[in-house]
Image (spheres, rainbow, N blue to C red):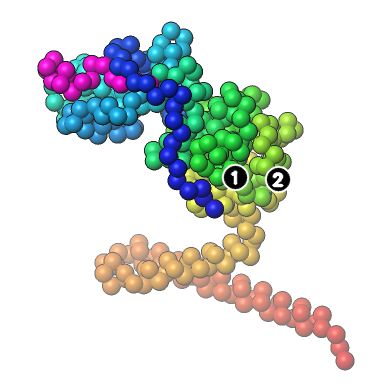
């Protein structure tokens, strides 16, 4: 049963202070930003551009123009490497930076935002922002985790996993404690943690890196896949309840690299992912992993569709093909009066289809007769 909603835990120090926006910087370690490939040395304007384009910062900016900065929910900041880092409230901070910087606004083509005079900037009270300062980011993790892992401003699965792993590694808290603090199910936290540890193992072994992903990292593909029996057997992955930081044994690193490439592709050699969408492709890959011949087809580069057909067996593929042919003919029959204008090539094509159908029926009839005679001969005589 899902835990009842609770208010977020308090921060260690409830004292607000106001800090000049020029003295603050975005949090490049924010799990939500790491998902988009932000590195510790990524330029701040690039990070703000990412926030603007991907996380609806424009809506926040317009709200601030209309009503000012809402001071009752301060930013949470901490000092790291000589900077005062915004560890909670990066979208609001980015909105203020854009409003205060005409060059940045022009770069983002934020034409809907008005040009603000010095007087208007003062009236909106965005030259300085309300903050709560904590000694280290670990001090704020219950508050931030509650808001974004299972609270009112939810992260997707990958930043959730990043945050859970960060808390576990930096505080030593067990996953059950983390789940209770952030208001999420223990089992969900375990699944997210295991999937992230699997990726970290792939990177440590050199069989795959997050930088290799073509497009965006669909982390939920992995969390779902690890729950499927054939994936679990293929990787020999440990049960989620073990909460291991090395869930895949060393002997399965080659297979782990293969799974990563199938899930996310590989931009090193321009290999496309075979999972275009979780439904139905992930279930198809699950079936392929349970069939040696199908797996061999996939490894040979024949594609998921071919490998999946192999995994179904000739009888199922044959029946499916007949049904598909019937469906296509029904569609053609329904459009012949309006879609056929006397083109000879189309008539020739229809004739070829009819001849092929006749040949198929003759072959099936002959084989049926042979099988019936064979069964008849095998019956015991009285």
The spot of residue 213 in percent (x, y) is: 50, 31
- Is 97 placed left or right of 315 in the picture? left
| Residue 312 located within the stretch drawn in magenta | no
Q: Please tell me which residue lies in front, 295 or 72.
A: 72
Question: What's the residue at 57%, 52% (across, down)?
Answer: 284
Q: Please tell me which residue lies in front, 208 or 125.
A: 125
The spot of residue 290 in percent (x, y) is: 68, 51
The spot of residue 191 in percent (x, y) is: 59, 41
Relative to 55, is 322 above or below? below
Question: What's the residue at 62%, 52% (across, down)?
Answer: 287
| Residue 128 located within the stretch drawn in magenta | yes
Mark yes or no: residue 259 visible.
no
Q: Nearer the viewer, mark 2 or mark 1?
A: 1
**Residue picked out by circle 2:** 233
Of the numbered discs 2 and 1, the one sitting upstream in the chain is 1
Would you identify the image quadrant in which residue 130 lies?
A: top left
Relative to 255, is 341 above or below? below
Relative to 12, is 189 above or below? below
Q: Please tell me which residue lies in front, 7 or 338.
A: 7
The spot of residue 13 in percent (x, y) is: 43, 22
Q: Residues within 10 Å of mark 2 (few under 14, many from 20)?
A: few
- Is 91 placed left or right of 114 in the picture? right
**Residue picked out by circle 1:** 187
The region drawn magenta spans 117-132
SS of the residue under disc 2: helix
Outermost residue toward the bottom in this view: 382
Outermost residue toward the top in this view: 82
Would you identify the image quadrant in which residue 109 lies?
A: top left
Question: What's the residue at 30%, 27% (across, down)?
Answer: 92
Q: Please tell me which residue lies in front, 234 or 176.
A: 176
Question: What's the residue at 41%, 11% (across, down)?
Answer: 83
SS of the residue under disc 1: helix
């Amino acid at each position: 049963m899902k835990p009842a909603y609770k208010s977020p835990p308090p921060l260690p120090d409830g004292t607000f202070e106001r800090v000049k926006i020029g003295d603050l910087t975005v949090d490049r370690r924010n799990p939500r930003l790491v998902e988009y490939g932000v590195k510790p040395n990524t330029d701040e304007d690039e990070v703000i551009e990412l926030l603007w384009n991907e996380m609806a910062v424009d809506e926040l900016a317009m709200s601030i123009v209309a009503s000012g900065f809402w001071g009752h929910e301060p930013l949470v900041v901490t000092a790291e490497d000589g900077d005062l880092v915004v560890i909670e409230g990066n979208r609001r901070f980015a909105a203020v930076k854009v409003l205060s910087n005409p060059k940045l606004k022009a770069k983002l083509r934020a034409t809907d935002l008005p040009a603000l005079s010095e007087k208007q900037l003062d009236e909106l009270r965005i030259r300085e922002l309300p903050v709560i300062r904590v000694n280290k980011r670990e001090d704020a993790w219950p508050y931030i985790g509650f808001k974004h892992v299972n609270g009112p401003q939810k992260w997707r699965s990958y930043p959730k996993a990043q945050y859970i792993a960060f808390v576990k590694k930096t505080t030593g808290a067990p996953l059950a404690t983390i789940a209770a603090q952030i208001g999420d199910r223990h089992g969900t936290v375990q699944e997210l943690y295991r999937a992230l540890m699997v990726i970290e193992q792939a990177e440590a072994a050199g069989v795959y890196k997050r930088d290799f992903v073509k497009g965006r990292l669909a982390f939920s593909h992995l969390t779902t896949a690890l729950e499927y029996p054939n994936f679990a057997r293929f990787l020999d992955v440990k049960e989620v309840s073990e909460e291991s930081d090395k869930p895949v044994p060393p002997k399965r690193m080659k297979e782990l690299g293969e799974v990563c490439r199938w899930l996310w592709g590989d931009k090193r050699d321009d290999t496309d992912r075979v999972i275009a969408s979780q439904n139905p492709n992930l279930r198809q890959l699950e079936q392929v992993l349970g069939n040696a011949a199908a797996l061999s087809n996939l490894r040979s580069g024949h594609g998921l569709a071919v490998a999946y057909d192999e995994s179904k067996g000739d009888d199922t593929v044959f029946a499916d093909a007949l049904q598909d042919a019937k469906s296509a003919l029904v569609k053609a029959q329904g459009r012949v009066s309006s879609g056929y204008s006397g083109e000879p090539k189309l008539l020739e094509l229809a004739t070829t289809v009819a001849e092929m159908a006749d040949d198929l029926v003759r072959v099936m009839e002959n084989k049926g007769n042979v099988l019936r005679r064979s069964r008849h001969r095998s019956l015991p005589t009285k």
